[in-house]
Image (tube, helix red, strand yellow):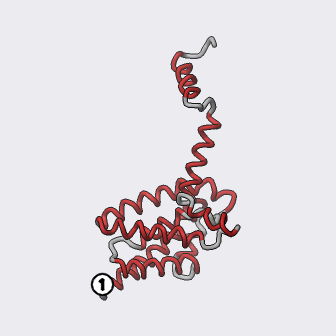
Amino acid sequence: MAGRSTEALDAVSFRRCLGRSSTHQTTASLASVRRVIASWFGTGLLLRRLRTSDAGSGTLAAAVTLIIALALGAAGWWLQVVAAALVIALSLWAAAPFAAGEGDPGWVVVDEAAGTLVATVGLGVWPALLAFAVFRIADASKRLPGVAAAERLPGAVGITADDLVAGGWGLAAGWAAQLLA
């Protein structure tokens, strides 16, 4: 193997020891990670597996995330903000390869998780439940201002943005209820 540096040979040997002798396997692994995150750790794939339809997958993922959001809220609103920011970033990254071919696939539900986390920041249980309901209605109907326009944005930004706008509507309703209570 004349012409190859010692570092290159060491890198090839290291990848072989890990069972990754090519970049194709590494790319496939990264695609699998993106699929797991995009499906919000499988919740987006569950209904398709049970009844061959993605319908309701977003609501299922949002409901699972609501439990997480309420638990984070008990630890402090700042933790909810950090979690929302992290999941928004994950949504933009994980949904990107699936946005090109399928638009907004029903099984990609990490965006619903992000919207749920946004909708519940700083809220108590009952206002958070109201915020969740408004978020899901706004996301599903696309009738509140900004939601449909955000969905028309290209790629992963459009997949994620409509849920963030809908989450903002939910947050506003939740805070109105919390302040009036």
Residue 22, picture quadrant: top right
| Relative vertical location of residue 171 with respect to residue 42 in this rendering, above or below | below
Q: Secondary structure at mark 1?
A: helix
Q: Position of residue 101 (x, y in %)?
A: 69, 57
Q: Residue at the spot x=36%, y=60% of the render?
A: 82
**Direction top: furthest residue:** 2
Q: Residue at the spot x=64%, y=64% of the render?
A: 105
Q: Residue at the spot x=33%, y=77% of the render?
A: 124
Q: Amino acid at mark 1?
A: Leu
Q: Closest to the observer: 45 or 2?
A: 45
Horizontal side of residue 46 vs 116, given as left or right = right
| Relative vertical location of residue 137 with respect to residue 14 in this rendering, above or below | below
Q: Closest to the observer: 13 or 141?
A: 13
Q: Position of residue 158 (x, y in %)?
A: 57, 65
Quadrant for the N terminus, please. top right
Quadrant for the C terminus, please. bottom left
Q: Which residue is mark 1?
A: 179
Q: Residue at the spot x=42%, y=79% of the render?
A: 129
**Direction bottom: furthest residue:** 180
Residue 23, picture quadrant: top right
Q: Residues within 10 Å of mark 1 (few under 14, many from 20)?
A: few
Horizontal side of residue 104 vs 113, given as left or right = right
Q: Closest to the observer: 14 or 81?
A: 14
Q: Is residue 104 visible?
A: no
Residue 78, picture quadrant: bottom left
Q: Is residue 99 visible?
A: yes
